[in-house]
Image: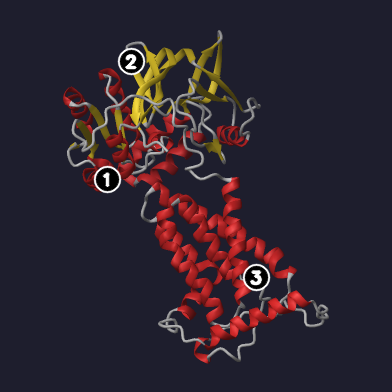
């Protein structure tokens, strides 16, 4: 490998201010080399090497994401995206714009030297840029995790001066570029705090300082134990009831009879059942995410027991829309989505195999089996005409796209149903992918979109599966889907 420094390029002419700054930079480097850094010798050279090629930050991101909290996963992803942008900028522009040689190692004690000296140009520091980009990206999404990562990032940046491979100005410039990259990523992809739903329409809900009057039903299968312990610390007077999945609906009905406010901890299906009970009893609902996806809680900007505990203590609440569907004697509500066609078929196939071969293999097998067939899983009558469809998706409020799939909602009380259909035809996998790639286009050969407050379907074949908030049932004949605007009061920590 050849160095980036071109020694044949003549040095620039003298410039008084620049020369003084470079002299100051060199002097600071020499001072750092002369000083004894307590406890640094066994740590900083190893830390500097571990950050080569971003290895340290990939490992840190994996550790943060392993905590399995949504905010931690988002923080890890944002940190890596910021690091990628910073590295791209440094390697394509920074290093080749200012071809500054590395410092001479003479003043630096040999014990500090890296085993392999870098041969790229010195300005700016790529390690400092990556460290600052990752730490800043994490902090923008999760300040608490940012506080954990920041000391490590600072140590990595300082290690570059300690080991003698960078001047102080190289590190400062790299850190500034890294932080700028993190803010650029935030401008392209806003953080959850920036895109949270508006704090309206505010609702009247009882303030329960210690949680007295709140009864929380938790689905034990959703891994809710730790979340319930956090909630108990926040609301020690609340009544907490843990039960098996089959007992959830009965326990919710019992809780509603004695509660001033109803609480629920579980996934989207459990929250759906709680919302149905809260609507029928006219109770405010407190949602503590406890399942795998938790779409409603996250779109509501509720992520843990601390946030919902504060909302209950202060009586902070908003009103949200609810979707309702009826088909013959069947009636139900949904907070997130309702769908007919490929997706319910996929869920049903997955459930058939998951207990035999495991969740992820069952998911893959279900996709292959459903998309391999040329049988349209859905035929419905719209405006007097029968249409073959691969998918009919109905969202409770507008879903903003994120990559190829519907993303999240920024308004949970917009009074609209977000309706999307994928037309029938051959090659379902290709049609579904084309519909996803069409993005915000309102119409394409593969799909169409509409915003309505009421939807009526006819001619649904007997035994057609319907998925709503993760639950699956069968419908037939005629089905009506409509909005219940601002029907449900939910606790939500307000800004």
| Residue receiving disc 2 | 330
Where on the picture, by quarter, is residue 232? top left
Cα distance in 3D space between marks 3 and 1: 44 Å
Q: Residue at x 49, y 33 (%)?
A: 410
Q: Is residue 437 above or below residue 119?
A: above
Q: What residue is shown with label 3?
A: 124
Horizontal side of residue 434 vs 396, given as left or right: right
Graded by Cα atoms within 10 Å as few (under 14), some (14 to 19) or many (20 or more), the crowding at tag 1 reads some
Q: Position of residue 179 (x, y in %)?
A: 57, 59
> Picture coordinates of residue 255 (x, y %)?
18, 27
Residue position marked by numbered label 1 in the rendering:
227
Q: Which residue is drawn at 62% across and 31% down?
A: 440
- Indicate left or right for 199 with 97 as reference: left
| Viewer-side residue, 126 vs 270 | 126
Label whose residue precedes the other's in the sequence (1 or 2)? 1
Crowding around mark 2 (Cα neighbors within 10 Å: few <14, some 14 to 19, many 20+) is few
The answer to which of 135 and 19 lies nearer the viewer is 19
Task: State left or right for residue 362 relative to residue 156.
Answer: left
Q: How far apart are marks 2 and 3 (CA)?
A: 65 Å
Q: Is mark 1 on a helix, strand or loop?
A: helix
Q: Earlier in the sequence, mark 3 or mark 1?
A: 3
Labels 2 & 3 near each other (Cβ < 8 A): no
Helix, strand or loop for disc 3: loop
């Amino acid at each position: 490998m050849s160095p980036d420094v071109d020694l044949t390029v003549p040095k620039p002419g003298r410039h008084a201010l620049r020369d003084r700054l470079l002299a100051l930079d060199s002097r600071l480097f020499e001072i750092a080399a002369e000083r004894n850094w307590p406890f640094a010798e066994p740590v900083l050279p190893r830390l500097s090497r571990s950050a080569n090629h971003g290895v340290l930050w990939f490992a840190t991101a994996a550790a943060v994401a392993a905590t399995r909290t949504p905010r931690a996963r988002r923080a890890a992803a944002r940190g890596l995206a910021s690091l990628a942008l910073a590295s791209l900028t440094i390697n394509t522009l920074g290093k080749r714009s200012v071809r500054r040689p590395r410092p001479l190692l003479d003043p630096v004690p040999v014990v500090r030297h890296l085993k392999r000296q870098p041969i790229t140009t010195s300005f700016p520091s790529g390690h400092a840029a990556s460290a600052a980009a990752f730490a800043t990206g994490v902090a923008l999404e999760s300040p608490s995790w940012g506080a954990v990562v920041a000391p490590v990032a600072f140590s990595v940046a300082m290690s570059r001066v300690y080991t003698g491979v960078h001047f102080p100005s190289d590190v400062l410039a790299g850190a500034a570029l890294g932080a700028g990259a993190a803010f650029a990523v935030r401008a392209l992809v806003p953080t959850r705090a920036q895109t949270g739903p508006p704090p309206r329409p505010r609702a009247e809900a009882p303030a329960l300082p210690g949680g007295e009057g709140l009864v929380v039903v938790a689905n034990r299968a959703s891994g809710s134990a730790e979340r319930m312990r956090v909630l108990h610390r926040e609301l020690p007077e609340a009544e907490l009831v843990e039960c098996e999945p089959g007992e959830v609906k009965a326990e919710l009905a019992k809780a509603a009879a004695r509660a001033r406010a109803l609480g629920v901890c579980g996934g989207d299906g459990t929250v759906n059942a709680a919302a149905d009970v809260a609507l029928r009893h006219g109770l405010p609902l407190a949602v503590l995410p406890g399942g795998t996806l938790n779409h409603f809680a996250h779109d509501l900007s509720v992520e843990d027991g601390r946030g919902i505990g504060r909302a209950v203590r202060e009586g902070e609440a908003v009103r949200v829309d609810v979707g309702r569907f009826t088909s013959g004697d069947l009636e139900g509500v949904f907070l997130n989505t309702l769908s007919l066609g490929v997706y319910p078929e996929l869920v049903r196939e997955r459930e058939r195999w998951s207990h035999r071969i495991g969740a992820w293999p069952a998911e893959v097998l279900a996709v292959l089996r459903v998309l391999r067939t040329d049988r349209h899983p859905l035929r419905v009558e719209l405006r007097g005409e029968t249409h073959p469809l691969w998918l009919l998706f109905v969202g409770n409020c507008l879903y903003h796209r994120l990559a190829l799939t519907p993303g999240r909602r920024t308004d949970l009380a917009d009074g609209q149903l977000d309706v999307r259909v994928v037309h029938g035809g051959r090659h379902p996998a290709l049609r579904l992918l084309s519909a996803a790639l069409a993005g915000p286009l309102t119409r394409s050969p593969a799909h169409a979109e509409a915003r309505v407050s009421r939807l009526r379907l006819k001619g649904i074949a007997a035994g057609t599966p319907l998925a709503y908030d993760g639950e699956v049932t069968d419908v037939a004949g005629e089905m009506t889907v409509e909005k219940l605007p601002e029907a449900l009061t939910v606790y939500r920590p307000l800004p």
